[in-house]
């Protein structure tokens, strides 16, 4: 009441009513000499509003490997530590190779023996061919020599192949990095007995990252390739805008969701493999009215605004009930009650009542900005 009395002194001729109270016939009953209250107005404009949902996504690398041995044995060397940067082919660990080395050495001896016998039969077959040409030996003797020569050649080739196979297996005792990357946790210790099922370590490359997003199966009709996706930080700031480049044709039986993948190339924040981030999937974008937060009044759980309209050739404040959505950039998204072009009153709303004379003054064009609206 004191504020109303003070304003009546400043603005004589203006009758003030409590804000939000709609007086019947207020415009008609206002004194004829009531002065119009100067107010700032802003034309209601449409801004692109995103219909979206937020999900928890997992960052994964296309180059991430769990290093498993291909042979069993005791670890004799650990040449890397967790966090080391390694390059492709770099030696990480070594498994005791002595047993395999002995097999390789034994096979080399067998190969040399087979080679010596092959070399002898190679000379022998040449002699038998000359003797047969000179009609000194029979055809049967020559055939036996040729058969012996072919057998020793086959034995020597088989021994050579076995030796190469054993040498290839010997290389498995030297565990190497599959590509350039960073060594992860090393859970094994020197002397541990490892098998082909023992995880030795991991090698990850924080490049070619992807966001794995599972959306509810009931939204299966809304997902499609190329859908916009926004990767957000903990404060809701957009780190990167990307698009869906993979859509799973199956429903995950455990999560009852559809797997979407989107590439991530953000360099502003260091993302790591297996990191959890917030991903906003944009279902659609449509123009909707947005209004400043301060132009909205509330009373008894109702939200309303004042719009400058013309009655009997004069500008008056008309109270409008509105349905609001989310907020963005200090603006409310209007779901109902206003349309584009309405002259929204954005100042002095606490002094207004329905039908009160006003003197509109333009507050300038509204700030256009994309307004995301989240919803499941």
Image (tube, rainbow, N blue to C red):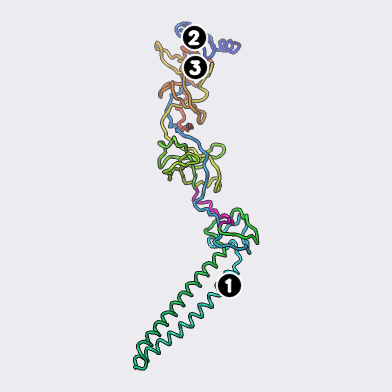
Q: Position of residue 369 (x, y in %)?
A: 46, 32
Earlier residue among tags 2 and 3: 2
Q: Residues within 10 Å of mark 1 (few under 14, many from 20)?
A: few
Foreground residue among 65 and 208: 65
Earlier residue among tags 1 and 3: 3
Q: Residue at x 41, y 31 (%)?
A: 286
Left or right relative to 103: residue 189: right
* Magenta stretch: includes residue 316: no
Residue that badge 3 annotates: 38
CB within 8 Å, label 2 to label 1: no
Q: Position of residue 268 (x, y in %)?
A: 54, 45
Instruction: Please identify the quadrant where the N terminus is shown.
Output: top right
**Start and end of the magenta stretch?**
197-209
Dominant secondary structure of the residues highlighted in magenta in the image: loop
Q: Give residue 267's mark.
A: none
Foreground residue among 334 and 215: 215
Q: Give residue 23's mark.
A: 2
Q: Position of residue 303 (x, y in %)?
A: 50, 19
Foreground residue among 219 and 194: 194
Residue that badge 1 annotates: 102
Left or right relative to 83: residue 113: left
As measured in the structure, the alpha-carbon distance from the residue carrying label 1 to the one carrying label 3 is 100 Å
Q: Secondary structure at mark 1?
A: helix
Q: Residue at x 51, y 68 (%)?
A: 168
């Amino acid at each position: 009441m004191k504020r109303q009395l003070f304003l009546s002194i400043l603005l004589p001729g203006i009758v003030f009513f409590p804000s939000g109270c709609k007086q019947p016939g207020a415009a008609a009953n206002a004194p004829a000499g009531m002065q119009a209250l100067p107010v700032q107005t802003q034309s209601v404009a449409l801004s692109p509003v995103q219909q979206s949902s937020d999900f928890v996504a997992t960052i994964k690398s296309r180059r991430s490997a769990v290093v498993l041995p291909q042979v069993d044995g005791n670890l004799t060397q650990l040449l890397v530590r967790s966090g080391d940067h390694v390059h492709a082919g770099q030696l990480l660990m070594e498994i005791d190779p002595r047993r395999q080395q002995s097999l390789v050495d034994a096979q080399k001896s067998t190969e040399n023996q087979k080679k010596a016998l092959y070399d002898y039969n190679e000379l022998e077959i040449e002699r038998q061919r000359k003797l047969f040409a000179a009609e000194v030996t029979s055809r049967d003797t020559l055939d036996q020599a040729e058969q012996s020569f072919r057998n020793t050649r086959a034995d020597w080739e088989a021994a050579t192949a076995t030796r190469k196979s054993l040498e290839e297996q010997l290389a498995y005792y030297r565990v190497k990095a599959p590509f350039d990357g960073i060594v992860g946790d090393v859970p094994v210790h020197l002397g541990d007995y490892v098998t082909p099922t023992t995880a030795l370590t991991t090698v990850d490359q924080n490049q070619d990252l992807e966001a794995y997003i599972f959306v509810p199966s009931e939204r299966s009709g809304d997902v499609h390739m190329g859908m916009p996706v926004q990767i957000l930080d903990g404060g809701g700031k957009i780190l990167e805008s990307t698009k869906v480049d993979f859509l799973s044709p199956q429903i995950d039986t455990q999560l009852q969701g559809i797997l979407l993948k989107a590439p991530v190339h953000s360099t502003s924040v260091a993302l790591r493999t297996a990191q959890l981030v917030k991903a906003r999937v944009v279902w659609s974008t449509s123009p909707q009215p947005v209004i400043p937060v301060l132009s909205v009044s509330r009373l008894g759980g109702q939200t309303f605004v004042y719009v400058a309209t013309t009655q009997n050739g004069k500008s008056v404040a008309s109270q409008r009930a509105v349905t609001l959505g989310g907020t963005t950039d200090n603006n409310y998204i209007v779901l109902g009650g206003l349309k584009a072009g309405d002259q929204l009153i954005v100042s002095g709303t606490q002094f207004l009542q329905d039908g009160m004379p006003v003197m509109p003054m333009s507050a300038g064009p509204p700030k256009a900005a994309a307004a995301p609206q989240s919803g499941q």
